[in-house]
């Protein structure tokens, strides 16, 4: 997963980066299966590895940049990014090693039906409003990305 994650952010071809991200997300689902979180693994595969990656591939194909090579960042930006990443890794590792993790006993069994009813509930504690807001936000981001990507082509066609 780490190799594919590094390949996803360091590859200059956009479509290959999306495919490497797919491998990372499938690896996360594999970890969920290994620790016996089957529901989360199924959600990871369907929502992220299935839906989001297909959405990204369609976005890449819609803007006709299948073989688009991303520009290489300047060396100063690369150094700043590397330092920021190392600081982030240091903060995460120090937090993990200094925090006292306690095992919490949970005797309440949550079923898939419970999760589904909470997800679509309008009552207090339900998640239908955030779910719908996020779907509208994703749709707006997709439309905005397409307009930005095709913006120059649309302007040139109107001048002709």
Image (spheres, rainbow, N blue to C red):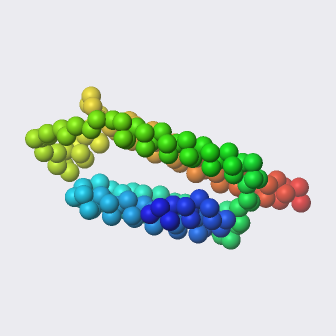
Residue in the picture at 40% in, 37% down: 95
Q: Nearer the viewer, residue 112 or 74?
A: 74
User: Which quadrant of the figure contains the N terminus?
Assistant: bottom left
Q: Nearer the viewer, residue 44 or 105?
A: 105
Q: Is residue 132 visible?
A: no
Percent x, y of residue 85: 57, 47
Q: Is residue 76 left or right of residue 156?
A: left
Percent x, y of residue 62: 63, 64
Q: Nearer the viewer, residue 24 or 128?
A: 24
Residue 62 against residue 40 in the figure, above or below: below
Q: Is residue 20 left or right of residue 125?
A: right
Q: Quadrant of residue 30?
A: bottom left
User: Which quadrant of the figure contains the C terminus?
Assistant: bottom right
Percent x, y of residue 128: 34, 39
Q: Quadrant of residue 97?
A: top left
Residue 68 against residue 147 in the figure, above or below: below
Residue 82 against residue 64 in the figure, above or below: above
Outermost residue toward the top? 124
Q: How many marks?
A: 0
């Amino acid at each position: 997963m780490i190799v594919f994650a590094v390949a996803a952010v360091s590859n200059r071809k956009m479509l290959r980066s999306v495919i490497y991200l797919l491998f990372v997300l499938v690896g996360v689902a594999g970890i969920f299966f290994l620790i016996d979180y089957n529901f989360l693994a199924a959600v990871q595969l369907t929502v992220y590895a299935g839906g989001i990656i297909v959405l990204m591939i369609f976005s890449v194909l819609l803007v006709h940049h299948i073989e688009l090579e991303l520009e290489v960042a300047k060396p100063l930006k690369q150094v700043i990014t590397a330092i920021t990443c190392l600081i982030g890794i240091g903060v995460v590792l120090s937090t993990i090693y200094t925090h006292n993790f306690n095992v919490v006993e949970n005797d309440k069994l949550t079923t898939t039906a419970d999760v589904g009813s909470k997800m679509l509930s309008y009552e207090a504690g339900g998640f239908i409003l955030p779910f719908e807001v996020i779907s509208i936000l994703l749709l707006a981001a997709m439309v905005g990305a397409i307009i930005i990507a095709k913006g120059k082509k649309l302007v040139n066609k109107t001048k002709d």
